[in-house]
């Protein structure tokens, strides 16, 4: 199953992907840099900067991913029962990509019913912007 993340709300996309992975399907999320988080830009940036600044010692966590594909994959991981075998197996079936890889261009893409047009607010931030703010490399 291929899910297009363009203009999709992150939480709803992640919960749908987690459910499908728990059912045993292979889930590929493309266009992770265009996934949306609702909220005011400065508040969302402060939240993720705070998580990133928590790790005072470099070898101890928490570690915040700075690439959009890893960022989205970690959100999906948090929605799985990762401490159980079935959750870990489901997590191994989830892959996220920046952009659209050539192998998925001609395949059928599933759209999740989580479009940003359903938001009642205009305040939203793209995952790509958050990762740039955290200091991620150019993808």
Image: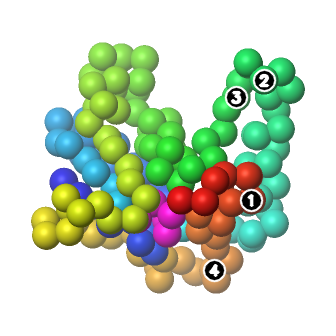
The residue under the point 73% across, 52% down is 135
Give how far across and how far down residue 115 sits, in percent.
Answer: 41, 75
Q: Residue furthest left?
A: 107
Residue with the mark numbered 3: 62
Cα distance between the residues tagged 4 and 2 = 37 Å
Circles 4 and 2: CB distance less than 8 Å? no
**Which is more N-terminal, label 2 or label 1?**
2
Residue with the mark numbered 4: 121
Residue with the mark numbered 1: 133
From the viewer's perspective, tell me whether residue 102 is left or right of residue 71: left
Residue 58: which numbered mark, if any? 2
Cα distance between the residues tagged 3 and 4 = 30 Å
Cα distance between the residues tagged 1 and 4 = 22 Å
Cα distance between the residues tagged 1 and 2 = 19 Å
Residue 4 covered by magenta stretch = no
Q: Residue furthest right?
A: 56
Give how far across and how far down residue 117 sits, in percent.
Answer: 47, 83
The residue under the point 64% across, 83% down is 122
* Circle 3 crowding by C-alpha within 10 Å: few under 14, some 14–19, many from 20: some
Give how far across and how far down residue 67 sits, in percent.
Answer: 57, 50
The residue under the point 86% across, 26% down is 56
**Which is more N-terminal, label 4 or label 3?**
3
Give how far across and how far down residue 12 sits, in percent.
Answer: 43, 58
Work out whether residue 59 can be spotted: yes
**Mainly helix, strand or loop, the magenta region?**
helix
Count numbered badges in the picture.
Answer: 4
The residue under the point 30% across, 16% down is 85
> Where, by quadrant of the figure, is residue 126 drawn?
bottom right
């Amino acid at each position: 199953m291929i899910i297009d993340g363009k203009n999709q709300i992150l939480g709803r996309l992640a919960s749908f992907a987690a459910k499908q992975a728990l059912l045993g399907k292979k889930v590929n999320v493309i266009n992770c840099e265009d996934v949306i988080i609702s909220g005011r830009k400065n508040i969302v940036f402060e939240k993720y900067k705070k998580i990133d600044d928590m790790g005072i010692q470099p070898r101890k966590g928490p570690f915040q991913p700075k690439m959009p594909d890893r960022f989205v994959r970690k959100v999906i991981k948090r929605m799985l029962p990762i401490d159980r075998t079935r959750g870990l197996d489901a997590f191994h079936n989830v892959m996220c990509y920046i952009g659209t890889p050539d192998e998925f261009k001609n395949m059928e893409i599933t759209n999740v019913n989580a479009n940003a047009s359903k938001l009642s607010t205009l305040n939203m931030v793209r995952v790509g912007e958050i990762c740039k703010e955290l200091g991620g490399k150019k993808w």
